[in-house]
Amino acid sequence: MKPPAASSPGAAAPLGGHARIVKAAAAARMRPNLADYAATYRDFGWDKARALLDGLPNGAGLNIAHEAVDRHAAGPRADRTALRWIGRGRERDFTWRDLRAESNRVADALQSLGLRPGARVFVMAGRIPELYLAVLGALKARCVVCPLFSAFGPEPIAMRLEIGEAEVLVTTEALYRRKVEALRPRLPQLRHVVLIGEGGAATAVPGTRDWTAMMAAAGTDFVIPPTDPEDLALLHFTSGTTGRPKGAVHVHEAVVMHAMTGRYALDLHPDDVFWCTADPGWVTGTSYGIIAPLANGVTNLVVEAEFDAQSWYDVLERERVSVWYTAPTAIRMMMKLGTAALAGRDLSALRFMASVGEPLNPEAVLWGVEAFGMPFHDNWWQTETGGIMIANYAAMDVKPGSMGRPLPGVTAAILKRDEDGGVSEVTAPMQEGELALKAGWPSMMRGYLNEEARYRKCFVGNWYMTGDLAMRDEDGYFWFVGRADDVIKSSGHLIGPFEVESALMEHPAVAEAGVIGKPDPMAGEIVKAFVALKPGHEANEAMRRELLGHARKRLGSAVAPKEIDFRANLPKTRSGKIMRRLLKARELGLPEGDISTLESDER
């Protein structure tokens, strides 16, 4: 397959009527790392990306924690700030030298427990320093690390500990007592629980160990053992539409992708202050909230508190954040407040903003220009891919609503499945098919834990089938249509919910929108929308008619929703994705499936 074509200046964005382009030159404040996309894509090789990393001394392999911490601690960046933590009323700074010593303590303490390489270590805590030290230390000890989202309830926590065959759980005393202690009898494989106390030693809890005491007894001279790049390193869970969540496993070789995408997709430079707002309980918060910035020698900002727009603006201003990676849900919440909340603030250090988690509506991309003087750069990837696959780059014109173009080293295509189980490539511009990636990138999952058949179903030949429907335009930009099981078939038309949601989002009263297909005896399916309104707008019949007319005007009667229901909030995962399948299940009275990642739920 040929590399994606260079951008055609002035080309119209093909979805949702957005014939607008944000020119790259308007936002650039320094020479981007990926200055010439076409040339870099053409000449790229994974050997070049690996050459940017050190590898373990004496050819002993590749270890994520060495690339993120130890190699910088042994060089000129040793005493520069690697991690800056902002807690509730407290702050802590860690240099790379500090991170090496403290993660060495964790590795030494885990080794003292008699863990073998490959032992499963789960870490469940809020965004506190101990979480980050535990992840890095466990990687040094060649354990398989699974950061677990602390807001999960007891049952999804226990389910993941069971599926993941957790031997060690590092958590806080409060979380253990509330969510794990009562379920401990059903977790016989969980040999050790290490408790982090509030501001000091944990209370003596039967069957647990104290983090503070273990760290005090541990040494700081740990030497990372030889690590094969294919050794398992990370375990991330992704919810299925039905049944139990899947555990996607990644290897130490993934750090090659983390480092490269941090450099190219997020445009990280050595003097940046980088803030990824994602929790490490999600793959984004691990890949880009821990590994990528540290591997690139960049100061990594961690904020303990949850979202609050004014507080976030305070952080951006006070900490002189230069690169910011956040989520569409947060952007939409900021949009609700408007630009007045930014008046008088000095955000001159901020030069690049990116978004991930679900497709970013065109209006949100353009609002970034209005509010911050630059667009939000959307990118696309999955838990299974381990790293960013398709992105909008600092030196590339942004077509609002587009996912962007593939990373160097990533071959993406639009494929159609045939009746015999094979696939063929769709080459005509803007023809819908399933987004597929040619296998072989470093952070590709190596399997679903203990589910080989489920893993193999993800591939057709050498193609990883993402399950996402997309299109590619004549300039090589990819456009998200929807999940394969989300696409609406109405009177012979294939309708992507994202396009409908984007049109509804353009109405000044709409804060969020989720769209499903509702069975209809005449049309097969009709489009139904669920809408959350911004404050100050009333959910009544007049508003319903206004939104229906707006959508028909924007999309045409064949694509526009036929029904609209209002909700105070739409059901979302903890990572901010609107759960269309849950909207559909409740509308049709179907089983809800796995809802362990549900964040908000107001029916």
Image (cartoon, rainbow, N blue to C red):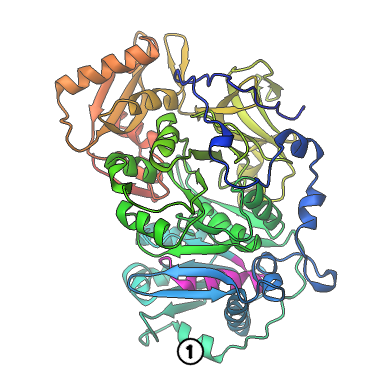
Looking at the rendering, in which quadrant would you find the C terminus? top left
Q: Where does residue 557 sit, x and y in percent of width and height?
A: 35, 9
Q: Is residue 571 above or below residue 202?
A: above
Residue, disc 1: 213
* Residue reaching furthest to the right: 58
Q: Nearer the viewer, residue 251 or 222?
A: 222
Magenta segment: 126-144
> 482 or 335: which is nearer to us?
335
Q: Is residue 255 magenta?
A: no
Residue 572: horizontal and vertical position, in percent? Answer: 36, 43
For this rendering, which residue is in front, 401 or 370? 370
Whether 128 is among the magenta residues is yes
* Residue 503 picture quarter: top left
Quadrant where the N terminus is found in the figure: top right
How far from the left and from the top, in percent, is residue 90? 37, 75
Q: Is residue 545 visible?
A: yes
Is disc 1 placed on a helix, strand or loop?
helix
Q: Position of 545 compared to 201: left or right?
A: left
Residue 269: x %, y % from top left: 63, 55
Within 10 angstroms of label 1, few (less than 14), some, or many (20 or more) residues? few
Q: Residue 369 appears in which quarter of the rendering?
A: top left
Is residue 224 depicted above or below 158 in this figure?
below
